[in-house]
Amino acid sequence: MWGLGRLAATRPDVLRVRDAPVYLPPYLESEDPEVRGLAARASGLLKAIEAKARLDALKADPAQFTFYDQGVLTPVTVGSLAGKALKQISIDH
């Protein structure tokens, strides 16, 4: 899921052409908070409207994990990533 997010950040067109946003919502239901959080991040980067309802429900998810980005490890919550994803999706809609 982390790699999918990296690709979504740099080449979202590659993933959109392959309908990747349609496949993300089930991962937002994962028991693993890291999978949920990274799926939320990828959903936002891909502006996956399909994931909006589930992302809205995840805004209150307090589960925390360590996120690696550009050489830095940062503690994040699933809820914070879901909230950011919703903002990214709403920019164009």
Image (spheres, rainbow, N blue to C red):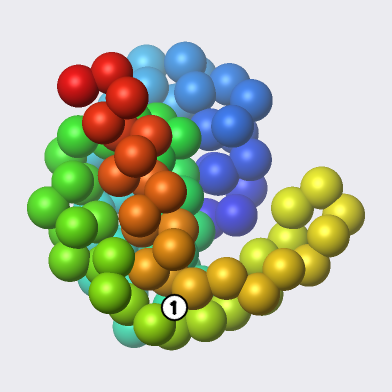
In this rendering, the answer to whether 24 lies above or below 10 is below
Residue assigned mark 1: 33
Residue drawn 65% across and 75% down?
A: 75
Question: Left or right: 69 with respect to 47?
Answer: right
Q: Based on the displayed image, in which of its 4 quarters is residue 68 positioned?
A: bottom right
Query: Can see residue 20?
Result: no
Report the front residue among 44 and 84. Answer: 84
Relative image position of residue 81 (x, y in whole percent): 45, 58
Query: Can see residue 90?
Result: yes
Relative image position of residue 8 (x, y in whole percent): 53, 33
Question: Left or right: 20 with respect to 51?
Answer: right
**Figure quadrant of the C terminus:** top left
Residue drawn 28% across and 74% down?
A: 60
Q: Based on the displayed image, in which of its 4 quarters is residue 9 positioned?
A: top right
SS label for mark 1: helix
Relative image position of residue 55 (x, y in whole percent): 24, 56
In this rendering, the answer to whether 37 lies above or below 89 is below
Amino acid at circle 1:
Pro
